[in-house]
Amino acid sequence: ALTITARNKQGGTTQNYSNGLFENNISITPSIAHTAMTTRYGAAINNQDINFTNGVSVVDWNDTHAIAFNFDRNASKPIEPFDVNGSDINITAIDLDNVRGEANQTATGTARFYYGRVYSTDYRGPSQIIATIRYEVYCKDCNFTDMNITGTQSPTALNWYTNTLHKITDGNITGFTPLGMTTVAPNVSTGIVNGLDLHGLTNGAANNAPYTDRIQMTPQTWLIYNPTNAAAFSSDFTVEFTRAGTWSGQGSLGQTVDVNTSIRTNKRIEW
C-alpha cells in the first residue's frame, strides 16, 4: 500500500484536504531504477479521486497499478536471468493545482526476469503429425533449482530449458504461417500446459508425399530468438511429410526416387 499525505508549508498534515472539501484529483507515477532498463515506468494513477481523509489517502498498489518494465532485448543474444529488487522506487504525486511531491522508498520483494523463446524441433513422418511447441528460458550459469527447470533440457539445444511455469498470458503464438500447403490446427495457441503446446500438422498435398514445408510461428517479440538474425519476426521449423510404409531418397538434382520400400530404416544404407 502507498500512503499519500497532504502537507502544509510548515510540514504538518493538512486536515481539511479531504473528500468533498479541498481535495483535488491526484496523478501518481512510480518508477524503478535498474541498470538493465531502457525505460523505467509504472502504471500511473491519472487524475483520479483517491479519497483523502483528513489529509491522508492510502492507495492499495496491487495488480491494477502494477509497475511495468522495459528492457533492451536482442533477439540474437540471450542473457542470464536477472533480478530487480525493490531498492530504488521513486514516487511522484501531483494534483490539479500543480502541487507536487516526490519521495524515494525502499520496497520489499524481487522480480526475476528471464530471456525466453518459443521453439519447435523439426518433424518428419506421415500426416498427421502432432507437433510439441516449447516455451523455453535461457540458463547457462544460473541456479536450475531456483528456476524450477531441472530435467527440462531442450531436445536440441544447450542452455535452453522448458519453462514449466509459462502460461498463455505470459506470451503465446498468435499465428502459424506455412510457406506451403500444410494445415496447422489450432492455428494459434489455445492451451499451454507445463510450458508445452500441441498442434496438429496435416499435409495439404497428401498425394504428393514426400513433401517438405516450412512453418513460421509468430509470437510476441519477447519470445523470438534467432542466433543469426536480430531482426527476425518469427520462429520457424520444418516439417517433412512421408508416405506411410514407404521411404524416399533425394538425388543430386532434388529428384525423389524409389517410394516403394519399407518405412523401416537401416543405418548402414540410410542416406
Image (cartoon, rainbow, N blue to C red):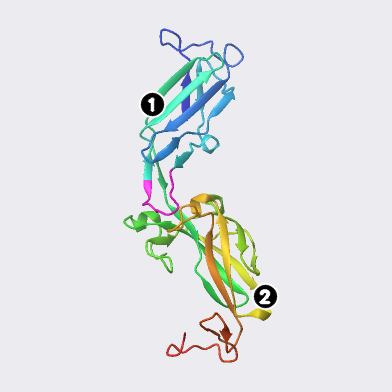
Q: Position of residue 19 (x, y in %)?
A: 59, 16
Q: Secondary structure at mark 2?
A: loop
* Mark linked to residue 104: 1
The region drawn magenta spans 72-82
Quick check: 95 left or right of 209? left
Q: Is residue 190 visible?
A: no
What amino acid is at disc 1? Asn
Q: Position of residue 189 (x, y in %)?
A: 60, 58
Disc nearer the start of the sequence (1/2): 1
Q: Residues within 10 Å of mark 1 (few under 14, many from 20)?
A: some
Which circle, 1 or 2, is nearer the viewer?
2
Magenta span: predominant SS is loop
Residue 112 magenta: no
Which residue sits at x=50%, y=11%?
A: 15
| Label 2 sits on residue | 205
Quick check: 168 left or right of 7? right
Which residue sits at x=56%, y=86%?
A: 247
When the figure is inspected, residue 165 is found, relative to residue 24, above or below; the finding is below
Which residue sits at x=64%, y=61%?
A: 187
Q: Please tell me in which quadrant of the rendered image residue 210 appears.
A: bottom right
Viewer-closest of 3 and 157 = 157
Q: Position of residue 87 (x, y in %)?
A: 35, 34
Viewer-closest of 6 and 54 = 6
